[in-house]
Image (cartoon, rainbow, N blue to C red):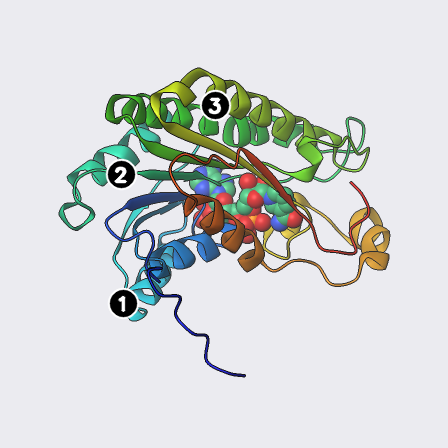
Amino acid sequence: MAKQKEIPGKSNKPLSGKTAIVTGASSGIGRATALTLAKAGAAVVIFARRKDRLTKLLSDIEKQGGKAITVVGNASYSEDVDKLLEQTLQWKEGGRKYEIVVVNAGRGLAGGTLSSDNSQWEEVYNTNVLGAAYLMRLAAKYFVNRKKGDIVVVGSVVGRNISPFSAFYGSSKFAVGAIVEGLRQEICAHGVRVSLVMPGIVKSEFQKVAGYNEDNFYQGIAHMGKLLEPQAIADGICWLLTQPPGINISEIMIRPTGQNYP
Ligand SMILES: NC(=O)c1ccc[n+]([C@@H]2O[C@H](COP(=O)([O-])OP(=O)(O)OC[C@H]3O[C@@H](n4cnc5c(N)ncnc54)[C@H](OP(=O)(O)O)[C@@H]3O)[C@@H](O)[C@H]2O)c1
């Protein structure tokens, strides 16, 4: 394959000088996003509960010439989210500021109202809705003061289309999607962009954590063919972040081509 030509006047590090926070960076979409934003020049703050995974990612980012710090914590605990932002603002190499927050930490849950495990309902809402909203609120206040900034939230196709196979999890993504659009309307006049990214089915640890198996998932999606890799979502996020400041891609849905539903 021929080497891609550089486009004159177009930087291959469009995010250089910016600091990006990525939650849920220890796996899947978050990990791919952190690597991609770092490649695009951003200094990245990577957050999740598993320290060993973050340490490995930090070393991978540094190997590709990027800058990162790790913050270990739980996205559903407000004190851990406070710590994430405090440590970001103390990070000298990140310029003691941030311009981008990717609210990605989340988990799935197989089943609808009858079939899902209700002992996990609270954790799903605490992480996907309340924790996400708390981070959005703090980032939004900071960005409104600075009159710029990007908040990107990872929702889901099941946060737009109801499916009986994941109705409970989907309801958390409906909720967060509503918060995202309301926040966009609240703060767009201050120069702050808010975006909702809704992935279709992506191969990651998500399926295992959610409790999907042959019967409740894989048989039903067999006809869809090749599923997405996390990189597809990371590329979408990087694309919307590199639009000119006057353009807000407020939502995108990215599915594998063969995914007819949801
Ligand atoms: N995969 C899909 O098909 C799909 C489709 C639509 C939307 N999504 C959404 O995409 C996002 C990322 O999912 P993924 O596919 O990349 O799944 P994944 O591989 O399981 O990654 C989830 C990430 O979120 C982190 N996380 C989960 N709960 C957390 C908590 N309480 N505190 C801090 N970090 C937490 C995990 O890290 P630790 O375990 O180390 O904390 C991990 O880094 C989620 O919001 C998910 O709902 C996924």
Residue on which the image places disc 2: 98
Q: CA distance from mark 2 to mark 1?
A: 19 Å
- Cβ atoms at labels 2 and 1 below 8 Å apart: no
For ligand 1, tell me if the residue under mark 3 lies within 8 Å. Answer: no
| Callout 2 crowding tier (Cα within 10 Å): few <14, some 14–19, many ≥20 | many
Please indicate, yes or no, whether residue 107 appears anywhere in the rendered image.
no
Residue on which the image places disc 1: 65
In this view, the mark in front (2 or 3): 3
| Horizontal and vertical percent position of residue 250 | 53, 33
Q: Residue furthest top?
A: 186
**Count of numbered labels shown in the rendering:** 3
Please indicate, yes or no, whether residue 252 appears anywhere in the rendered image.
yes
Amino acid identity at mark 2: Tyr
| Horizontal and vertical percent position of residue 34 | 40, 53
Amino acid identity at mark 1: Gly
- Cβ atoms at labels 1 and 3 below 8 Å apart: no
Residue on which the image places disc 3: 184
